[in-house]
Structures are given as C-alpha cells and as structure tokens.
C-alpha cells in the first residue's frame, strides 16, 4: 500500500505527535492555573451560567453534564498526564490504536474546555490546537508506517492557516498593501516582548521588507507544500523561519509554535537528516533510520484513516469557500467540534496603543488622587519603566482581554465582575496579576483610566530609562465601591 503509507516521514511523525502533545500540555497547565479564576464557580464568567442557556449540541462539552472547579482540575490533570506520555514517546511504542486513543482523549478534554471558555477561549489558536490534536491522532504508532493521507491533510491545515492569513491581510487594511503595517505592529501588538522595542526602532525600509517578506511567505510558500521533494521541505523551512521571527518579536501564545510543528508534515526524513548533519555530522546515518515497512498496515487502520480523512475533506468545503470570499471570515469554526476551521489574523493593524490602567484606593475620599495605586498585569504594559516580558507559548488570557477592552469591545461583563473581585480581595483573581498594591486588605474604591502608550525613542530611553511614554486620555470606569451590606 505505497499509496497509503510511507517510510520517508517517520521523523515528521515524531515531531508532529510530540510537538502537538507538548502544546496540549501547556494548554492544560494554563487551564489549571487560570480557568477557575476566569470561568469557575466564582469566576468572571461562570461556566454554569453559560451552560444554563447554551445547549450541548451547540457547545459539546463534558461540563454540560456538570461543572465544578474540582472536575476542571481533574480534566486539566488528566490532560497534562496524557500529554506528558506522548512527549516521552510512550504510546508511540504500542499498537497503532494507542496514540490514537490518547490524542482523541486529549481532543475531547480540551474541546470540553474551549466550548465553555466563552470570550477567554475565543482565540484562533484554541481551535487550531483542537483540530491539530484530532488529525494527529491518526498518524499511528511506530508499529505502522506513517499514513500519507494524514500528512497531506496536515499540509492542507498549514495552507489554510498561512494562506488564509495572507489573504486576510491583502483584503484588510491599506497598511498591508502599502507595506507600512510594521511601522506600527511591534508597538501596538497585543503583548510586546523584550525584543519588540528594539525591532520597532529598525529603519522604515526594514519594516517594509518585513511586510513584503510576510506576503511572499504566506501567499507563496503554502502552495509549495504540495510540491515534490525537496521543494515541499524548503517551503516548510521558509514558513518555520518566518514563524521564528514572530516568536522572537512578540507573544502570540502557542500560535507560532504550533505552526512550526505542523510544518514538519511537509519535511521528509532525507531533509531532516541533511539538516541534522549540518549540526551534528554523525546524525546523517542514524536519524530517521529503522522506520516501519510501508506494507505493514492493518486493514482496520487503513479503513479508519480513510474514513476520517474523507470526513475532513467533506468538512473542508466551508473553509475553502471562505478563502474565496471577499468578505473572508477570520478564525471561524463551522461546526461545534472545531474541525477544519478558517484561520487568519491582523487583517488590520492598530496604529495607536491604548491601555486600561486599573487602580485602587484605600482612602475614604475617592477624590484624593495621591491615594490611588495601580495594579500590574503580568504581560500587558503598565509601569512605563518595566521591560515587556516573554510569556509565549503560555497564554495570559486576562491580559489579552484587556487589550481587546482598550480597543472598545462591547461585551464588558467580565471586566465589571473583575473590578468587583478586586474590591473583594479575591485571591484567585489576584493571582492572575503581577502586582497587588493592597496585599493587607482590599481597597475601598477601584477605577479604570485610559492612557495612550507609545514606545520611548532611543533618546527618551537614555534620559528616563523608560520603555514607554504615556499620556492620559480619559476615564473608562469612574471610582466605584461595593454596595453596603
């Protein structure tokens, strides 16, 4: 069955299985750390309120049956444990159904989290991780050769991810067409990292080159993923290099890392051995050797894989049609299982950065401006003297929502509850922050002010040692306090 299986992509399978599992591990660990405070029994948007009005068929989830913080922690713990076994390569040593079972469990458990996660889990990389976990489940184990149809569908996933992002930029803001988008992006992106300030101050010709390079990579390389080798491997390598630049210059959770992992589906063992030999010459003879015989395929495995891939091809109609639409949807799921989605990001680039600064006061008089102290978030800018941190591939969900809040999103229910939790001194909520200026007792009042932020110039940086310059724009929430008992 040479048409079905190949012995030339054993290294790719290892990278795909272990890499996706590692990202699942991070995602489940993130849920353990953040989900109860955001969506738990005493969270900002409690799951119970969501499942009371949204039926199972619209959001399939284990938590439709019942939710408790204890059950969430059990799901997260099992997810971390199962992911860890794949990272270690243990299920891959067994029969073909074993890694399939493990990945399908990971898929079901994380889908259960995403489908009740509401706005805190409404990011494209959540659907991407769900979809990738489902597809990778059918790569089999070391007992069988790597199934070729699954590799092709993974390339189709990378194509949708990259080509969709490229199209949405060309169809989006003028700044992508006149090559000026990167004049602003490094400064206004949701969560800058320690390198962003330095890259922002590159010459404008370099930023134009970044945009042009982005267009070439996202609109050209994905097509070549389906070309014969070594062209497909080279195209995958170009995509990986572009994603590493994004890793270096920003914090986009695991979006860039999962793209890097998925690109391995287009790289054959010969290319991996060549790359390995550049670093360690003795790898040339050993890496990728000893793969399963392509003829050794259990009939049940062939039937299952072909049935699943056929289903995925049928589901591809909707995202394929979306790519052809001028009103292209960005990061859209067409079914409640988040399979075969549409992807894309930054159709327009924000040209000014607004930040919501949340402050508290212990004074009985909220008009006493000297008594107000600012809360500091882990990732989003606040203190102008603090260098932006590196958090990806971890996803700081509260910080990301604060960025969208500053853009003027309409649904602010979670933020209203967040302010109430600060007034209550809720420990779970406060653990999401980097600094609580009211460690002994909660404040009497909280407020939220809006500031315009920009990166300091090199001259301003030398004079003040600040990374940011800010000016107050207005008030989002005036001083509020808890009602009397």
Image (cartoon, rainbow, N blue to C red):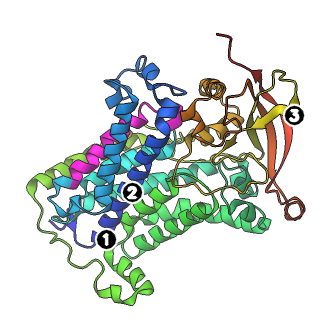
Report which residue position mark 2 lands on.
Answer: 22
Q: Mark 3, mark 2: which one is toward the viewer? A: 3
Q: Residue 354 in magenta?
A: no
| Highlighted magenta segment, given as a residue range | 99-121
Q: Mark 1, mark 2: which one is toward the viewer? A: 2
Per the model, the C-alpha gap separating discs 1 and 2 is: 16 Å
The picture places residue 415, in percent across and down from the top left corner, at 63, 28
Label 3 Cα neighbours within 10 Å, binned few <14 / some 14-19 / many ≥20: few
Residue at the (58%, 29%) spot, across then down: 426
Report which residue position mark 1 lands on.
Answer: 11
Report which residue position mark 3 lands on.
Answer: 370
Q: In this view, does 323 lie to the left or right of 369?
A: left
Q: Looking at the figure, which quarter contains the C terminus?
A: top right
Q: Is residue 378 at least partly visible in the picture?
A: yes
Residue at the (61%, 57%) spot, across then down: 390
Disc 1 or 2, which lies upstream in sequence? 1
**Majority secondary structure in the magenta region:** helix
Disc 3 or 1, which lies upstream in sequence? 1
Mark on residue 367?
A: none
Q: Is residue 407 at least partly visible in the picture?
A: no
The picture places residue 387, in percent across and down from the top left corner, at 72, 57
- Considering the numbered disc 3 on the image, is that residue within a helix, a strand or a loop? helix
The picture places residue 349, in percent across and down from the top left corner, at 69, 48
The picture places residue 34, in percent across and down from the top left corner, at 50, 39
Label 1 Cα neighbours within 10 Å, binned few <14 / some 14-19 / many ≥20: many
Nearer to us in this view, 58 or 64: 64
Residue at the (33%, 67%) spot, across then down: 12
């Amino acid at each position: 069955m040479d048409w079905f299986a190949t012995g030339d992509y054993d290294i790719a399978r290892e990278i795909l299985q272990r890499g996706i599992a590692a990202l699942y591990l991070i995602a489940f660990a993130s849920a353990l750390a953040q989900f109860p405070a955001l969506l738990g029994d005493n969270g900002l948007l409690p799951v119970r309120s969501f499942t009371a009005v949204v039926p199972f068929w619209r959001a399939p989830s284990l938590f439709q049956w019942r939710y408790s913080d204890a059950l969430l922690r059990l799901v997260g713990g099992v997810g971390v444990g199962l992911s860890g076994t794949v990272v270690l390569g243990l299920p891959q040593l067994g029969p073909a159904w074993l890694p399939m079972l493990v990945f399908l469990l990971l898929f079901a458990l994380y889908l259960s989290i995403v489908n009740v996660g509401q706005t805190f889990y409404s990011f494209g990389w959540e659907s991407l991780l769900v979809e990738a976990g489902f597809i990778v489940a059918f790569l089999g184990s070391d007992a069988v050769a790597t199934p070729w149809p699954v590799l092709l569908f993974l390339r189709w996933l990378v194509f949708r991810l990259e080509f969709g992002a490229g199209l949405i930029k060309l169809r989006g803001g003028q700044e992508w067409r006149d090559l000026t988008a990167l004049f602003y992006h490094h400064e206004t992106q949701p969560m800058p990292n320690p390198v962003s300030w330095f890259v922002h101050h590159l010459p404008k010709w370099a930023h134009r080159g970044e945009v042009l390079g982005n267009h070439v990579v996202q609109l050209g390389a994905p097509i070549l993923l389906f070309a014969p080798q070594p062209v497909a491997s080279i195209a995958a390598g170009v995509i990986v290099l572009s994603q590493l630049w994004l890793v270096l210059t920003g914090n986009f959770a695991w979006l860039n890392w999962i793209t890097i992992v998925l690109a391995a589906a287009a790289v054959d063992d010969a290319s991996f051995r060549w790359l390995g030999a550049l670093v360690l010459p003795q790898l040339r003879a050993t890496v990728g050797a000893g793969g399963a015989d392509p003829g050794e395929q259990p009939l049940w495995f062939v039937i299952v894989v072909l049935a699943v891939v056929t289903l995925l091809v049928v589901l591809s109609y909707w995202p394929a049609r979306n790519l052809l639409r001028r009103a292209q949807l960005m990061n859209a799921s067409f079914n409640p299982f988040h399979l075969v989605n549409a992807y894309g990001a930054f159709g327009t680039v924000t040209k000014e950065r607004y930040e919501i600064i949340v402050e508290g006061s212990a004074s009985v008089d909220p008009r006493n401006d000297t008594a107000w102290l600012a809360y500091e978030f882990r990732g989003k800018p606040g203190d102008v003297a603090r260098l932006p941190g590196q958090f990806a591939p971890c996803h700081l969900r509260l910080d990301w929502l604060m960025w969208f809040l500053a853009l003027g999103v309409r649904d602010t229910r979670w933020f209203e509850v967040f302010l109430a939790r600060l007034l209550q001194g809720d420990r779970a909520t406060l653990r999401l922050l980097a600094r609580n200026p009211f460690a002994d007792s909660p404040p009497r009042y909280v407020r939220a002010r809006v500031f315009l932020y920009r990166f300091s110039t090199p001259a301003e940086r030398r004079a003040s040692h600040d990374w940011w310059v800010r000016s107050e724009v207005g008030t989002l929430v005036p001083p509020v306090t808890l009602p009397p008992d």
